[in-house]
Amino acid sequence: MDTRARIRWQPVHGVLLLDKPRGLTSQDALQASRRVLQAAKGGHTGTLDPLADGLLPLCFGAATKFAQIHLDADKAYRAVVQLGVSTTTDDGEGEVVRAQEIAAPVSRAVLHAVLARFVGAIQQVPPLYSALKREGRPLYAYARAGQTIDVPARAVRIDAIDIVSIEGDRVTLDVRCGKGTYIRSLARDIGEALGCGAHLAALTRVASGPFTLTRAHSLDALRALEPAQARALLLPIDALVQDMPRVDLDSSQSAAIMHGRGVSNPSAPTDGLLRLYAHDDTQRDVFLGLARDDAGTLRPQRLLSNEELQTQSQST
């Protein structure tokens, strides 16, 4: 019998911080977590390559409405760079295209000087084997078909690269960067700058926006729990938008907003999105969704449904 037929899917709302294991796609990790939670709806906040492990925030139910916002969050990684070997995919899963013996470990001073070139706003060429699209096709489709195409560089931001260790021909680095940065490309370019070639041998995401790996749960730990126990680990729906300014509304204002009408902004006008809150009968905070200030008037942008509001109020 299909085990999926025995799962009692139900509305589940919140954010799960998952410690994704290496070798699993982000989609597979999402579906495995969804089965444990018995969540009817789920999504992730941006893919983490199968080669990589570490923090993968997953959204369920109403939280999926805000997953796209987290795609722009800054990230932090621990990367192991293999010097002397270049591959077609810029990681350990590709074919070797260049190999060079490293006679002696690179000095910390030389490595530090090279890494400094990649800190700040830089131009980076994405890997040929990536999901970025060119004329409607992902780049990896061209690469697998043996087609050679020019991949234009694009602007990315790297805030810091710190040397953790140098062990023979392997270098471990801590990287903090902005959205769209490929650590595989960074490893490749560091190898080129050193004149020996390199690829990314291992990668762990240690932070994504305000979330850190220390707060994440492994799949094995989740599978050992009952669905209700696993759901108790979820962060609230508004966890992905905690860095946005907060506005508290009274009952008449919240009713107007929930009917799609604009209301006067009780706080100072603010650029960008704002998170809205009301209070239930017991004076507990209830997250309503997001709005944008328009010359002193709050205009609803992304709101929770009545069912989602009721579920949130019951679980707060």
Image: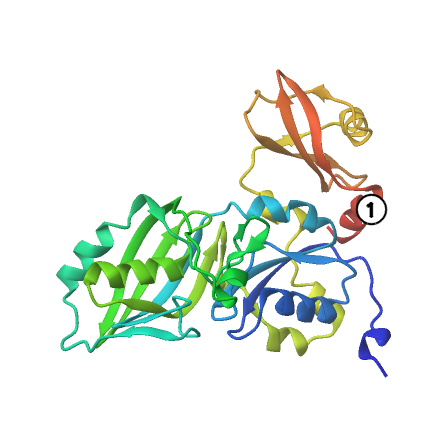
- Residue 267, quarter of the rendered image: top right
**Image coords of residue 109 (percent x, y):** 13, 60
Residue nearest the observer in this picture, 10 or 190: 190
Q: What amino acid does circle 1 point to?
A: Gln
Q: Nearer the viewer, residue 52 or 242?
A: 52
The image quadrant that residue 5 belongs to is bottom right
Q: Residue at x 51, y 45 (%)?
A: 72
Looking at the image, residue 230 lies above or below residue 247:
below
Say above or below: 250 vs 57.
Answer: above
SS class, disc 1: helix
Percent coordinates x, y for residue 112 in the rendering: 19, 57
**Which quadrant of the figure has residue 90?**
bottom left
Horizontal relation, residue 162 to residue 273: left or right: left
- Residue at 17%, 54% (x, y): give it: 113
Q: How many labels, in total?
A: 1
The quarter of the picture where the N terminus appears is bottom right
User: Horizontal and vertical percent for residue 316?
Assistant: 73, 50
Farthest front residue in view: 147
Q: Residue furthest bottom?
A: 1
In the foreground, 246 or 32: 32
Question: For the point 64% across and 73% down, which residue is it?
Answer: 222
Residue 239, image x and y in percent?
Answer: 61, 49
User: Mark 1 highlights which residue?
Assistant: 310
In the rendered view, does 5 fall on the left or right side of 206?
Answer: right
Left or right: residue 139 versus residue 315 is left
